[in-house]
Amino acid sequence: MEAGPRLPVFVLTGPTGSGKSDWAIALADSAPVEIVSVDSALVYRGLDIGTAKPARAVRERVPHRLIDICDPADSYSAGRFLADALGWVRDIHARRRVPLLVGGTMLYLRALLRGLAVLPPAVPELRAGIDARAARDGWPALHAELGRLDPEAAGRIAPADAQRIQRALEVCYSTGRPISQLQRATVSPLAGWPVRVWVLAPPERTRLHERLAQRFAAMMAAGFLDEVRGLRDRGDLSARHPSMRAVGYRQLWAHLEGEYALEEAVARGVAATRQLAKRQLTWLRGERSGTWLDPDDGSRLSWIRDICHELGVLGL
């Protein structure tokens, strides 16, 4: 189906708030690329302000795949993402264009770059036991146990990330093997294509923190609280839904439930966003792959020119 060299797959990633969407749209305006989102929150309809979802007018001009494909009451897994993303990669290549995978959900990115491990199914009895222990001792205590059983997994899972701690312990208990070991024994589904990876991140953490605080303030001014209130008023969502556990949504939901004042909710939301960015950067540095770019040094134009030249060589 493809003549000559196999068309590449481009990946633009980086921590939250680093400007990935703006760079991707600028490239799509100049080169024969199509954007595929790699973001676990953008899949949900109605989560617009708090996810910094590209405006509808922008998406009408530059199509974005894997955005607004789920209701917030539904779940969307890494396995489903991988199947959907690969389907779009093939579709875009079939039209002699290049897929640009854009986003910072590291679980999805790991599935693309390393493959998705075949893990055992859930064991309800084990999960119930883990939940009971967490209720008694707290998730940080179970995270410490995971650190003894699987230091690699514990290193990339936050001490309060109940869902991932539970799953990692469940796999350890049911298979006798660390989940990180099973995940390493995989092959990237992108292995058949030339893959180029760029990481967009300010070199100074303080600069990223400033960007994140400014972005959260802009979201609040744009009506973020009203957006969360509207989702809560639907009546079919709870704080346990994956969509409502997204950074920012979780903290504002708790405020609406009366757990703390709005000022504290905003402070917690900013802090959680910073923690997310830190985890993303830690994982990306550990990958040791890709070209790192500073979003503030004016390199976007040269980046676009380089890609246009590269694609011109391919004869698109």
Image (tube, helix red, strand yellow):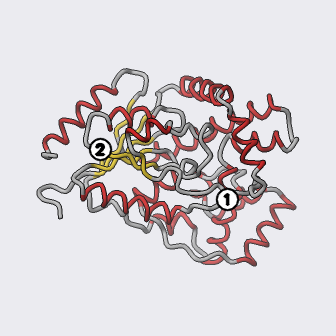
Categorize mark 2 by other alpha carbons within 10 Å: few (<14), some (14-19), many (20+).
many
Q: Classify mark 1: helix, strand or loop.
A: loop
Q: Position of residue 244 (x, y in %)?
A: 69, 50
Amino acid beneath label 2: Val
Q: Where is residue 38 in the image (x, y as percent from the top left)?
A: 47, 50
Measured in 3D between alpha carbons, the distance from the residue under mark 2 to the one under mark 1, in whole angstroms, is 32 Å
Q: Residue at x 68, y 60 (%)?
A: 163
Q: Residue at x 69, y 50 (%)?
A: 245
In the rendered structure, find residue 241 and report the number of the disc placed on it.
none
> Height in image: 213 above or below 240?
above
Q: Classify mark 2: helix, strand or loop.
A: strand
Q: Which of marks 2 and 1 is nearer the N terminus?
A: 2
Callouts 2 and 1 close, C-beta under 8 Å: no
In the rendered structure, find residue 33 and report the number of the disc placed on it.
2
Location of mark 1 (residue) = 73
Q: Residue at x 50, y 73 (%)?
A: 118
Give the quarter of the image for residue 175.
Answer: bottom right
Q: Nearer the viewer, residue 116 or 264?
A: 264
Categorize mark 1 by other alpha carbons within 10 Å: few (<14), some (14-19), many (20+).
some
In the image: residue 91, left or right of residue 173:
left
Classify the position of the N terminus by image quarter: bottom left
> Height in image: 220 above or below 50?
above
Q: Where is residue 157 in the image (x, y as percent from the top left)?
A: 62, 53
Amino acid beneath label 1: Ala
Circle count:
2
Q: Which residue is drawn at 50% across and 45% down?
A: 104
Q: Which of 311 and 34 is in front in this view?
A: 34
